[in-house]
Amino acid sequence: MNGYAMNSRQDDMTTGEAQGEGLVLTCVADGVMTITLNEPKTGNALDVAMTEALAAALERASGLSNVHCVLLRSSGRHFCTGGNVKDMEAGADLMQGSVEAVRERLAGSLHRITRALHALPVPSIAAVNGAAVGAGFDVALMCDLRIAAENARFAESFLRLGLVSGIGGAWFLARIVGVAKAMELTLTSEFIDARRALDAGIVSHVVADDALDAAAERLAGKIASSPSHALRMAKQLVRQSAEASLPAALEMAASMQAILLCGEEHKAAVRQFLK
């Protein structure tokens, strides 16, 4: 078996089936798995329970063969306001205890979100409204694409609380905007609006507040309609090529293209194109 071949698991979620009534809602329709952060009273803050629920939903998404794109969105006024500051004050958040205990807790909780989003074999989109702050900003950065409402605002705000990004945001931010801009956003904790985020390459599109859901769904649907094996390989090729030498990137491209050219999916796509 070639290393670029795609695994296919059959534990599909039924099309149109919604799951969850609490902190995180999920639904699969037309190849898109929509994951909704659903705790608007806290601004969808990443407290212990929200972190566990989101990590579980993302881990499940990787194993569903009828999912070809993941759309991460929120209910309420904000996408995600990061850690719950009230929990921090009360000593009820993840970052309590000894240094070693906190390290282990981060690896077993928040880092599950990071690993799950980065490991998704299909493209992911964050639809951002309101605030995406701290770890909430970082979660959006972990998605492959971001689309923002006009009212969206972003901040790598950890220094305001005497912290750094413990969820891996620095790794993603520097790769998206470059080291100098990432350094500026990190060291100033500055809030930027949707238009500045667009200019910096953080988001791909900015739309009216009331058009966000429809625009994100259209984008996700367009991506999910692509031939599924080629879609997964295309994502893998772009990501790996960004950090590979040109000879290594050419080898990857040749291997993937050979697999796809010899597959039935490509032949079916050609027949459809010529109709």
Image (cartoon, rainbow, N blue to C red):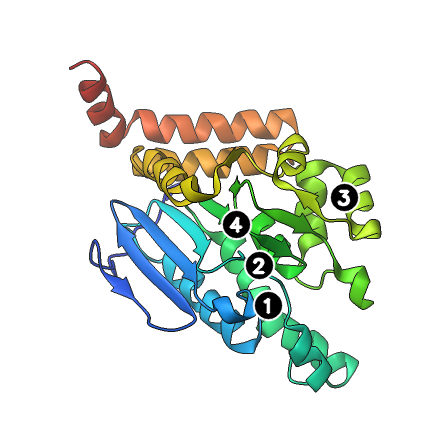
Distance between mark 3 and mark 4 Cα atoms: 21 Å
Q: Position of residue 19 (x, y in %)?
A: 29, 66
Give, as a three-letter code, the residue at label 4: Asn
- Residue 95 visible in the picture: no
Left or right placement of residue 45 versus residue 245 in this view:
left
Which is nearer the N-term, disc 4 or disc 1? 1
Residue at point 61%, 62% (across, down) = 81
Q: Secondary structure at mark 4?
A: loop
Residue 54 higher or lower than 87, as above or below = above
Residue at point 71%, 64% (across, down) = 166
- Residue 69 visible in the picture: yes
Q: Are marks 4 and 1 in contact (CB under 8 Å)?
A: no
Give, as a three-letter code, the residue at label 2: Thr
Badge 4 density bin: few <14, some 14–19, many ≥20, Cα 10 Å: many
Residue nearer the viewer, 128 or 19: 128
Identify residue for label 2: 114
Which is nearer the N-term, disc 1 or disc 3? 1
Identify residue for label 3: 182
Distance between mark 1 and mark 3 Cα atoms: 21 Å
Identify residue for label 4: 129
Q: Secondary structure at mark 3?
A: helix
Residue nearer the viewer, 53 or 237: 53
Which is nearer the N-term, disc 3 or disc 4? 4
Q: Are marks 2 and 1 in contact (CB under 8 Å)?
A: yes
Quarter of the image for residue 100 reads: bottom right
Which numbered circle lies on residue 110? 1
Q: Nearer the viewer, mark 3 or mark 2?
A: 3
Which is nearer the N-term, disc 3 or disc 2? 2
Q: Position of residue 15 (x, y in %)?
A: 20, 53
